[in-house]
Image: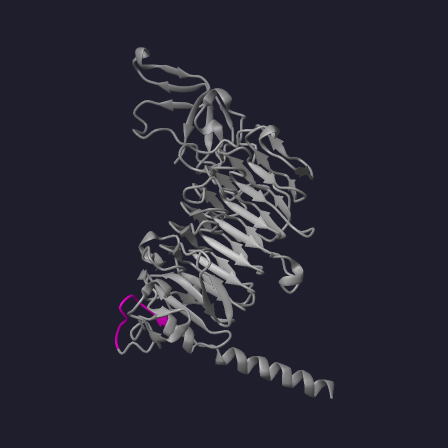
Amino acid sequence: MKKILLFTLILFTQICLEAQTIRYVKQGGSGNKNGTSWTNASGDIQAMINTSNYGDQIWVAKGNYIPNRGADNLGTINNGDKRKNAFVLKNGVKLFGGFAGNETSLNQRNIYNPQNKSTLNGGGYCYHVVYSVYDDRNTRLDGFTITGGKAILERNIVIVEGRKISRGDGAGMYASFSSPTVLNCIFEGNIASNGNGMGGGFHNYKSAPWIGNCIFRNNTANNGGGIGFRECVPRNTNNLKPVVNNCLFYNNKAIYRPGTRVAGFGGAIEPFSSDVIINHCTFARNTAVQKGGAIYSTRINAYSNIEIYNSIFKDNSSRDVVMANGTGDIWVKNSILQHSSGYASNINNNGNVKYGVNPNFKPNTYVPQDQSLNNANDANYVSPVVDKAIHKYNLPSTDVYGNPRKEGDNYDIGAFELTERYHKIKIGNITKTYGDNNNTFTPNPTSQNYKNQNICLNNYTYQSSNPNEQKNMHQQQKHLL
């Protein structure tokens, strides 16, 4: 009997896997536009979502895609009030962007090539760009830029899959009673400012998304410029917690309600009565006009516990870098807050939290650097985040910019991995005879590859028949490209 049941289960699984379908989308469509191949790609993302079943995939080629159907009536193209148009995810269906439009396997996709950018665009008028309602973790949004959402209506709702959705929150994406997986996405240029709007980039109500390898930049809301969480606790989310993993937040803003001094909390993130896990994230230059330039956490009814691991906070401005209001708790471990502890409040230091430490980013980036590559007088100095992470949650194989992770002995703290490492190697009494080779001397070891490393040359000597051309170079550094 057990053998029969096992055989039946295997057969059922095989049938389900074989039934999974890939549908294709190109901007404007191609061929007969039925979505069965790149040659016959659809131009309508929502139509492909509507047609798909649990486990199906939709591959979206480079291009700019504006929603054409009202979120409350997905079967009909809406040419009336386009502000209510949006893309609505479907449970178990996986959307992948970032294709050139000729790939035959998912691993051929190059999401880091800007030529392959797939944009879901609200056009600056749609209340929301993307919805996720009643979706599980197998529902996936991967490889898109989400922009142009404008949630500005207070006390105004839309019904999506039976749920009431505020048109004043979550301009880029709104999740309700949902736990989608959102990977490799950029949320930028979205605004939720209805007077008390939350989550300019992404708002979550009683939801537990897994957000990984994403960038949140230049989003604005009254509270939680990048992401808002409201009542996202295990009892409301099938015992799941929201996770923000390996993400960058910069230049997000929490602003006042127009004409007042109300709101303005949490430049990057505001968790309200929510449990949230934040791991390997970098917060830089986020602002809140009141409190919590990076994070402002508040709670009611004994909720709102925030766990932060392996993260960096730099140049976030307001009264506090990290703020927990009232009885909210923020647990921080193995992280760097560049400002002193006086700029952070209600933090439970759960181990190895460094205040007032410069994470030492490369100029004009948020990537850690090996200072010795630029400063020969400080050859042993390395960014304090390099190889200093503790293991908490599984990380992807790349950092948020696509660099291999891990690169050294351990993961780096923050959303980026240092890929250019300094190694000092002393080579003594090297002699080069002038005329032997017109190229610059390059060590040629066979046991190790020294690409992108510094070689420290000791007593490097050029010899020539003309004594005046002899040169001794002591402790010179050469960077091998």
365 magenta-colored? no
Position of the C terminus by quadrant: top left
Q: Quadrant of residue 65?
A: bottom left
Task: Judge whether residue 418 can be spotted in this image.
Answer: no
Image x and y of residue 216, in percent: 45, 48
Name the residue rendered at 36%, 18% in the picture. Answer: 463
Task: Judge whether residue 312 can be spotted in this image.
Answer: yes
Please count the marks in the image: 0
Outermost residue, right side: 1
Classify residue 291 as left or right of residue 238.
left
26 magenta-colored? yes
Image x and y of residue 238, in percent: 64, 65
Name the residue rendered at 35%, 54% in the picture. Answer: 148
Q: Quadrant of residue 6?
A: bottom right
Q: Is residue 338 above or below residue 232?
A: above
Name the residue rendered at 35%, 14% in the picture. Answer: 470
Image x and y of residue 83, in percent: 34, 62
Q: Is residue 296 above or below residue 42?
A: above
Q: Is residue 185 above or below residue 285?
A: below
Q: Along the line of sight, which residue is nearer the eye, 332 or 301?
A: 301
Outermost residue, top side: 468
Main secondary structure found in the magenta portion: loop
Q: Quadrant of residue 33?
A: bottom left
Q: Which residues are magenta?
A: 24-31
